[in-house]
């Protein structure tokens, strides 16, 4: 790679490894540039597919940030992504490729729903009891789903990439069994609606006291997500455990020599990751869907979380902001034709982002004249 | 329930996994893991089907599928070989891109009507063999027979030819291969392309032969991921890959067919009387993949064999120890 491309040209490019750290603003600028390039590439593909890229992007902007109502909807879409991306970020930090956040998210929704539907708590239970119990159940179910690939990785060196992904499909079939076979409402593919106590409070609920909140759907899940992000930030950057996780991720050999238990941490981090994704599932089911139903839960939040985590450079606080951007993309995408466009743009953004990391490790020098 | 019919259909369904698994096997043997198989298969399935509809020629569909999927694979090749980025994340992003592009370009394709499919035929003489002839050589798609040919050819190529030796060298010890004058970068680009073409062929096998049509993401339903798991189970050996692929194909068919009959082995068929149990059947291929991975990984640990030594590492000229 280090050789120049050509000697014949007058101007040639030379790629050299960076010897010192680039300035602090540089990574953000490169990421931003990558997104711009991705949007341009996406636009080219949209027009190749017979669409109008300018109208598509304009539509995305208007349908997601146009007024407080849609902005609130954007934040609602961002909420599950925050938690799913946090889940991915803690695992990726240790170079554990948990791509099963989707399944853990679904199981979290299932666990939380089971509290209402089994029923573990009676329907007239107060919100103050319902919500914490559902949160714990969702996190527990997600953690179990994260434990399986973590345990298999730690004990048998089974690739967590494949095992966690396979469990996504198992989770969907599992939830389908319950909503079709056990908790179905009149033969439809969904459970009955949850009682009010199992709903996360929304801004609109306080419209009497604050008229400005009328019709706003943003719910308590946003607060849960932000608090979770802050807690994860402290765990990763300010705790001994977080230090161990980062050390294993950066240099597993050094970590081993330092006496860090990699087996234990593999299982624990996968469980933490699963619990966060499960909490996302709980937030979505109690804040938006209000019943157990497969389609709105298995909507790909776990996969979007992977991209968001990477785009935010695994930083828990940056995840919040990147999630809002992706929430906008998903929200606007519902009306865009062809319907695959948001997914395609997400993919292209990730590709450009990974490619742009090259610019963080290498610099390109333009060399004048002949060598 | 006639088991020979299930196995016969299972072989056809396993051919999809066979192509995808062999493709990934070639890429990984050269040291590049490509998690984009699912996306490349979708690209293949979509482009094969739409080409066949547009031109009426399924053969052209197969060619376009292989070319387009191979082209898409080069995104991954560029990012991980030239830009030396992480192979896991890049492969994942390839799946996103492949899925997205195939959904965009495949819009409306599901209602586009029927196409002329690839021909099915029986092999004379071989079809007369009792039981086996019925399973392997009767009324199969031509791609199934192509699959039979690929397995020994792939094995021979990797283990007995000079380019195969180079392939293994690049995956095991790229700096030594480089010192011998083998162009590591070009070889890796090439085998990622081969992997992409075979994934595209796998997609075309679905949409033009095994279960014809375009059903957006459900067309592949995670088979690309199963193929990646099968490569590990196969210990990077084409023969074992074939066994795994056909076994999985048979399992998929069995799951579809087991819910039909009233009686199962002389008893009331529980899957007929309680259709909701079918959801547990749907889990089986995925659970079985995990199970097979555990077996493969334990075996690899015990025998100290396994992944090509350089799998997942970018090759940087002049760096030691890679």
Image (cartoon, helix red, strand yellow):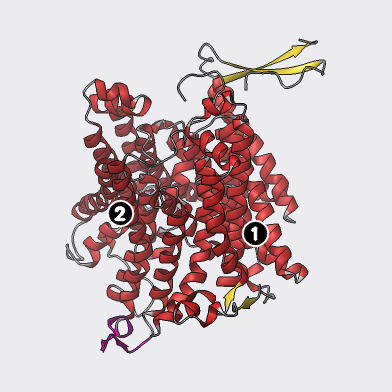
> How far across and down, in percent of the image, does residue A182 sit?
27, 74
Query: Can residue B177 be seen in this snapshot?
Result: yes
Which residue is rendered at x = 74% and y = 12% of the image? Answer: A367
Per the model, the C-alpha gap separating discs 2 and 1 is 31 Å
**Location of mark 1 (residue):** A338
Query: Can residue A65 be seen in this snapshot?
Result: no
Q: Nearer the viewer, residue B13 or A34?
A: B13
Magenta stretch holds residue B303: no
- Labelled disc at residue B110: none
Q: Nearer the viewer, residue B189 or A47?
A: B189
The answer to which of marks 2 and 1 sits earlier in the sequence is: 2
Q: Nearer the viewer, residue A89 or B260?
A: B260
> How far across and down, in percent of the image, does residue B36 sit?
53, 48
> Are the numbered discs 2 and 1 placed on the same chain, yes or no?
yes
Q: Are marks 2 and 1 in contact (CB under 8 Å)?
A: no
Placement of B261 over or under B20, stated as above or below: below
Mark 2 Cα-neighbour bin, 10 Å: few <14, some 14–19, many ≥20: many
> How far across and down, in percent of the image, does residue B81 sit?
58, 33
Query: The magenta stretch spans which residues?
Result: B261-273
Magenta stretch holds residue B265: yes
Placement of A97 over or under B221, stated as above or below: above
* SS at circle 2: helix
Q: Nearer the viewer, residue A281 or A158?
A: A158
In this picture, residue B143 sits left or right of residue A123: right
How many labels, in total?
Answer: 2
In this picture, residue B237 sits left or right of residue A255: right
**Location of mark 2 (residue):** A108
In this picture, residue A370 sits left or right of residue B246: right
**Subunit under mark 2:** A
């Amino acid at each position: 790679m280090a050789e120049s491309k050509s000697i014949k040209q007058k101007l040639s490019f030379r790629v050299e490894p960076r010897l010192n750290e680039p300035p602090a603003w540089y990574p953000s600028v490169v990421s931003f540039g990558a997104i711009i390039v991705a949007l341009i590439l996406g636009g080219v593909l949209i027009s190749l597919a017979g669409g109008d890229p300018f109208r598509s992007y304009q539509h995305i902007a208007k349908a997601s940030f146009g007024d407080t109502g849609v902005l609130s909807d954007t934040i609602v879409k961002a909420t599950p992504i925050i938690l799913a991306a946090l889940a991915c970020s803690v695992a990726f930090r240790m170079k554990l490729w948990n791509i099963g956040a989707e399944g853990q998210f679904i199981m979290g929704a299932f666990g939380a729903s089971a509290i209402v539907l089994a029923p573990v708590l009676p329907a007239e239970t107060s919100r103050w009891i319902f919500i914490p119990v559902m949160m714990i159940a969702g996190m527990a179910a997600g953690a179990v789903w994260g434990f399986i690939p973590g345990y298999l990785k730690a004990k048998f060196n089974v690739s967590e990439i494949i095992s966690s992904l396979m469990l996504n499909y198992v989770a969907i079939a599992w939830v389908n069994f319950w909503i079709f076979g056990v908790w179905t409402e009149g033969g439809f593919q969904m459970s009955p609606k949850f009682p009010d106590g199992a709903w996360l409070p929304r801004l609109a609920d306080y419209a009497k006291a604050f008229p400005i909140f009328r019709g706003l759907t943003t719910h308590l899940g946003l607060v849960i997500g932000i608090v979770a992000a802050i807690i994860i930030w402290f765990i990763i950057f300010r705790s001994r455990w977080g230090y161990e996780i980062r050390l294993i991720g950066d240099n597993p050999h050094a970590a081993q020599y330092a006496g860090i238990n990699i087996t234990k941490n593999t299982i624990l981090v996968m469980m933490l990751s699963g619990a966060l994704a499960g909490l996302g599932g709980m937030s979505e089911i109690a804040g938006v869907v209000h019943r157990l139903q497969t389609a709105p839960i298995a909507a790909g939040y776990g996969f979007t979380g992977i991209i968001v985590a990477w785009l935010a450079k695994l930083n828990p606080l940056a995840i919040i902001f990147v999630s809002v951007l992706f929430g906008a993309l998903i929200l606007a995408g519902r009306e865009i034709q062809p319907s695959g466009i948001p997914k395609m743009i997400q993919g292209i953004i990730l590709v450009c982002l990974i490619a742009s990391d090259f610019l963080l490790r290498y610099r390109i020098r333009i060399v004048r004249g002949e060598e | 329930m006639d088991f020979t019919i299930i196995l016969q259909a299972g072989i056809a369904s396993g051919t999809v996994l066979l192509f995808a698994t062999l493709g990934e096997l070639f890429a990984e043997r050269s040291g590049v893991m490509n998690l984009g198989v699912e996306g490349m298969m979708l690209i293949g399935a979509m482009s094969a089907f739409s080409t066949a509809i547009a031109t009426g020629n399924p053969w052209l569909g197969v060619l376009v599928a292989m070319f387009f999927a191979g082209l898409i694979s080069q995104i991954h090749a560029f990012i991980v070989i030239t830009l030396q980025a992480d192979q896991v994340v890049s492969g994942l992003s390839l799946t996103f891109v492949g899925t997205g592009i195939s959904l965009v370009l495949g819009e409306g394709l599901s209602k586009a009507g029927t196409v002329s499919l690839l021909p099915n035929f029986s092999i004379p003489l071989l079809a007369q063999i009792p039981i086996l002839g019925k399973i392997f050589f009767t009324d199969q798609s031509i791609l199934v027979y192509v699959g039979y040919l690929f397995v020994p050819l792939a094995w021979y190529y990797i283990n007995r030819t000079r380019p195969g030796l180079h392939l293994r060298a690049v995956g095991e010890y790229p700096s030594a291969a480089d010192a011998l004058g083998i162009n590591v970068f070009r070889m890796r680009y090439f085998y990622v392309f081969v992997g992409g073409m075979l994934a595209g062929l796998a997609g075309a096998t679905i949409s033009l032969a095994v279960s014809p049509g375009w059903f957006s993401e459900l067309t592949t339903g995670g088979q690309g991921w199963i193929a990646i798991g099968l490569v590990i189970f196969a210990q990077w050996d084409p023969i074992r890959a074939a066994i795994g692929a056909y076994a999985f194909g048979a399992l998929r068919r069995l799951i579809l067919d087991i819910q039909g009959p009233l009686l199962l082995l002389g008893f009331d068929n529980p899957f007929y009387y309680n259709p909701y149990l079918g959801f547990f059947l749907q889990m089986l291929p995925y659970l079985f993949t995990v199970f097979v991975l555990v077996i493969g990984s334990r075996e690899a640990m015990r025998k100290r064999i396994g992944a090509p030594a350089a799998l997942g590492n970018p090759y940087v000229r002049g760096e030691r120890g890679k």
